[in-house]
Amino acid sequence: MDLSIDIESEAGTVVVGVKGEIDLSNASLLERRLLDAFDGSKPMVVDLTEVAYLDSSALACLHRVSVAAGDRAVQLRVVTGEEGMAKRLLSITGLDEVLRPYGTLHEALASISSEH
Amino acid sequence: MTVPVRNESSTSCTCPSNGPPMNKISNPLTSSPSFPISLQMHARARTSASIEAQPLLRATSAGDDWAVSEPNGARDEPGRDRLRRAIVEALRDGFFRTDVDGAILEVNDAFCTLVGYAEREVVGMRPPHPWWLEDPQGGERTDEKIARLREGTDRGIELADTIVSRDGRRLHVNASVRVLRDDGGAVTGFVGTLEDISERSAAQDRAGRLGELGELLARSVEEDEVLDVILDGVLRTVALKGAGLFLPTNDGALEPRRHRGMGWTQEEPALPLSADLPITRAFIEGTPYFFSDRAEMEREFPDVTPLTNAKDDHARATLPLLGRRAPAAVLHLLFNGVYEFSKQERTFLGEVAARCGLSLERASLYDEQRRDAVRAQRLQEAFAAMAAAGTPAEIAQIALQDAVPAFSARAGSLALVDEEGSELRLLGFEGSDAARAEGWDVLPLGADLPGTDAVRQRRAIYLGDRAAIAERYPDQVALSEKVGDHAWAALPLMTGTRSIGLLFVNFPTAQAFDAPQRLALESMADRTASAIGRARRSAHEHDVAVTLQHSLLPVVADRPSVRIATRYEAGAQGLDVGGDWYDSIGLPDGRIAFAVGDVVGRGLEAAATMGHLRSALGALALRGEGPGAVLEGLDEFARAAMGTHMATVAYAELHPNDGTMRYACAGHPPPILVPVDGPARPLDGARSPILEMLDVPRVRPVATARMDPGDALVMYTDGLTERRNETPDVGLDRLLRVLDASRDGDPEAICDILLERVAPIGARRDDIAILCARLREIAAVITRVDAAADRLVDIRTDLEAWLRGHEIPAPLLEDLVLAVAEASANAVEHAYRDGRAGDITIEGSVDQDAVLKIVDHGTWRYGEGDPDRGRGMHIMRSLVDDMEVIRRSDGTTVLLRKWLTGSS
């Protein structure tokens, strides 16, 4: 499955860029990577803007990661872009109420800095 | 007083018994009491020559026994000759006297006129005389016949012959010749008369023709017919080039109604009575006009010149056709050439015109009466039809269809005031489209128009001619001219004191709008208004009933695996709700239950029972124990809850995965199976009586059948098939025939066709419920992969390619791919958890909808496992229009459907 996960630490924030397709075959891999990427209490931004396909496995993964972030008092921001499959699926399942996705990475980062 | 001929009195009065009776008045040789009177009349008629001035006998012959006795019997020779000559000259008939060889001795003026020779030319002329036909029909010239009288003892001859006058005219004459003998009996000469019967035979001929015309006219009663008879009859009676009839219109003109041989075009203009033309003058004055040629007509009536296209110079006669009451028409005759009308001909034509006029008047009276009677009849029929009509639109149609012809109108329209009371909206129109005024479909009620005024003022407005229109509605004159109207009637439709609409009638001619016509128009409007009022009330009641009925019936959605359509049609009784019902229930294991039933009776109670029964059936079906158990449960329900209502039901459960079906019928018509490739057939196994009201437990038989993909199942109530005076078999046969003919339709179309062809509206007498289900044909296998997570991408790729091939647009394609992937992921995660190897098959079909089928052969149940799977199901349901999960012991099938048309 074509998936790339890019993790950068930038100005006190962990930014994970995900590209490709997420389904049952690689959702657990993504989940492990994200959990691994937690860096203390540094805020984390998961950017799904470049994700071409995702399914309920991916949503399940995101949901579990957000629960874990809550456990660790880590601010988690999810970027879905203004439109696209990720935003649509979050909306269909109601997960957008929990994950509160952002339209752009810039907005997500800005929301973190404004809180500090 | 008699003036006997002095000749042998015993013979002179003897006419040959074999000849026709002679005109005694003018024949001096046949003594008759009326002779002098006629003589006097003739004498008076002749003005050219004085009796006294005529020379008396110029020639005397040896046998001078030609003399007339004086009344006093005295034989005074000069006086006697004078008298004789006076008589001879006064004769209208030609007179001649010859010697024994036939040489002319004496003739009178009339003779000279007949033969065309002067007296001096003929006196002394010996036979053969040129005026006798050379070759008469008898074979012998008349002068030869006369000459032969010398031989025999005949006293004379009478014969009819033709003479040719000097100028070539042929004249029919009766010739009467007497032999003159001396006292010894020897022939001394001949004396004779020639009576011109040309005119008389023409008169007889004319009288005959007039009689024929009269008979024809008497036989025809309707005006149209009479007009034809007049033209055809006149053309038979008089040699003419053409004839035309002008009839008065209601607005002071004479319109050319019909013609023969006049070369009129269709659009011959009507002639205003004010025009100074022979036709109008003849009509107004009641006197005929005769013109021996066109120039004469144009001299007298210069106005005629620009009006006539004719370039001929022929004679014309313009005859008023007078009735007893008034002039009925003008008959205009065009002759074949220039012609001088004789007095007789003028009289004759006058007689023709008189007969035509009387017939025409009688016919128009008859037509008027008949029109009134027909109108009354038509209106009665319209009233009856309106009383039976259902909707205001139907009533409008009936009213207009009957009113327009009944009033000899050109068009009619019916409009209703809208709910806000601000507009008049057209409900119906009758007449040619050309007659329809643009922009009149909706009229603001405040407009200054005859129609809106009539509605606002609640009174009829009659505009009898264009002048009346111009006076009251000057802006509308142009419209009336454009559409060809001459008169309008605008009648408000009143219910009580409310004005609910308008009946507007357009007339092609000016109208008198007399009392009977107004009464008829207004009663038409009254009846229409009350019918519409009634229809509105019952439409409201009917709506309530239909709404209630539909609220009691389920909305049966068709499924990805099975297309389902249903219909409920109320019977003719209309207002009551009925007890027919249908339902379809998806059972937990994916089977689909179909039911159609009928609670006998109508009204709310039957409807309520039907509702209970349907609920009970749903509950029983969901237990999943099969058709037998369902019907047995309904038996129990019937005993407990249905009171006296009898009910029937047909019930079937279909497994859409393999098409197996189990069914049972309780007193209900059998379901019909319509195979893709065979004749429709009733499923008539598993028949048992109606639902049981008696306390006797019953085991209901169940039968099986199989539906292949594409097969249809039709369930119905007997209202679909049963008709009065038919056995149920006839209706079933009709249903099967129609299904055979329409097997390819989708269920919606099949339902429509069944209603239309098996139970057309006029043939329905009961409620009808129909359920039609067609098992989906899903032919294409898109892909088959091992049930493994890393093969999901292959499913997505193959499906996307397949959907692109079917030109599914991108957003729909994306949703379908995701939904199928979710279903496949379910199968991967759960179906083969026991470690068995298995595969996943994706099948699909694209029509108005895209249906995708995900088949695994594992065992799993929805609701098992973690909540995240539930999220997958939720995603699937959100992305497609319908989802169906069918479980069997050997695996699970998920069907997903997305509509491609905008319909769902």
Image: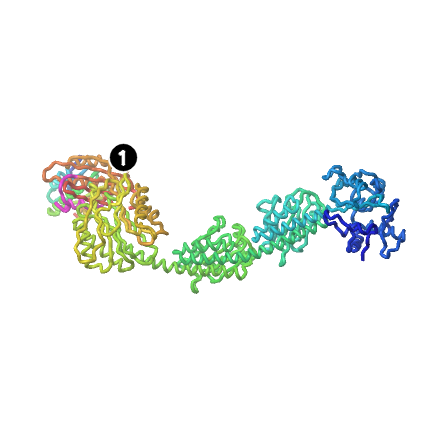
Is B355 left, or right, of B498 in this rendering?
Answer: right
Residue B387 vs residue B630: left or right? right
Residue visible at 10% across and 38% down?
A: B835
Bounds of the magenta segment: B856-878
Q: Is residue B459 above or below residue B192?
A: below
Q: Nearer the viewer, residue B21 or B594?
A: B21
Q: Can residue B352 be seen in this view?
A: yes
Residue A107: tell me if it is visible: no
Residue B7: x and y in percent read 83, 50
Relative vertical location of residue B495 with respect to residue B289 in this rendering, above or below = below
Q: Which residue is drawn at 73% across and 39% down?
A: B138
Left or right: B376 with respect to B707?
right
Say which of B440 and B623 sits in front. Answer: B623
Chain letter, disc 1 residue:
B
Residue at the limit of the structure toward the bottom, as seen here: B497
Question: For this view, does B597 lie left or right of residue B411?
Answer: left
In front here: A45 or B424?
B424
Which amino acid is tagged 1?
Gly
